Each structure stands twice: as structure tokens, then as C-alpha cells.
Image (spheres, helix red, strand yellow):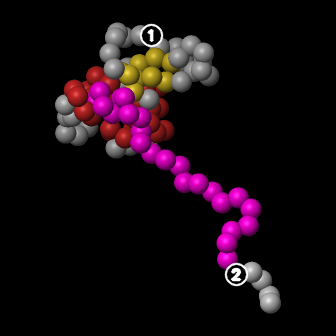
């Protein structure tokens, strides 16, 4: 599958994770909105990552009935990342009772 999108113009960019957080949808839904053309953006030439225009995400948010955020909030979200962290997994033996004594 080869996705080619053209730059629609300059502006603040968001990742699909940031857009998903703003729209209160899953990342897969944000990807689908981009792939179907409902959100404008482009695919990076080397990595193939999607970059979405914050203004386009805001248009979709408005159409979805979500309270519009201020331009500074959109810039802040685009600048800070998703803010989500992954849980760490324990490797090896965990602390606990030391077996039969």
C-alpha cells in the first residue's frame, strides 16, 4: 500500500497520536480519517509517518461537536507529544516469597 499525500500548506503539525487524543478517538481511527482524506496532512518521505495539519484536525473536531480549542492549545498539543507513557514490564524474577524454607 503506497499512500501519497501532498502538502496542503504550512502550519502546525500533529502526529496521529496527538490527533487521536484531541479528537478523543483511537489512533487507528485518526489514521483512517487521514487515509480517507477527512484530515489533511502528508506522509514523511523517508519514514512513511503521517503528519497531520493541526488546523485540519480542529476542523474535524468542530464537525464532531468537540469544543474547539484555542490556537495556543493546538500548538501546545502539537509541541508536547501525546504525553502517554507505556507501562514497564518486569523482566526476570519478581520480588516475592522465597520458596520453601
x and y, in percent, of residue 33 in the image: 41, 30
The answer to if 94 sits in the magenta stretch is yes
Q: How many marks?
A: 2
User: Residue 81, which numbered label?
Assistant: none
Farthest-out residue, bottom: 101
Range of magenta residues: 74-96
Secondary structure state at the residue bearing disc 2:
loop
At a point 56% along the width and 13% down the height, the residue shown is: 45
- Residue bearing the label numbered 2: 97
Q: Earlier in the sequence, mark 1 or mark 2?
A: 1
- Residue bearing the label numbered 1: 6
x and y, in percent, of residue 31 in the image: 47, 32
Q: Nearer the viewer, residue 38 or 55?
A: 55
Quarter of the image for the N terminus: give it.
top right
x and y, in percent, of residue 89 in the image: 63, 57
At a point 74% along the width and 81% down the height, the residue shown is: 98
Amino acid at each position: 500500500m503506497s499512500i501519497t499525500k501532498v502538502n496542503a500548506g504550512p502550519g502546525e503539525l500533529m502526529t496521529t497520536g496527538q490527533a487521536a487524543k484531541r479528537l478523543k478517538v483511537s489512533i487507528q481511527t485518526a489514521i483512517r480519517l487521514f487515509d480517507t482524506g477527512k484530515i489533511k496532512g502528508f506522509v514523511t518521505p523517508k519514514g512513511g509517518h503521517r503528519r497531520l495539519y493541526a488546523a485540519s484536525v480542529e476542523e474535524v473536531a468542530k464537525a464532531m461537536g468537540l469544543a474547539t480549542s484555542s490556537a495556543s492549545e493546538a500548538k501546545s498539543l502539537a509541541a508536547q507529544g501525546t504525553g502517554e507513557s507505556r507501562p514497564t514490564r518486569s523482566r526476570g524474577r519478581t520480588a516475592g516469597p522465597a520458596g520453601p524454607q
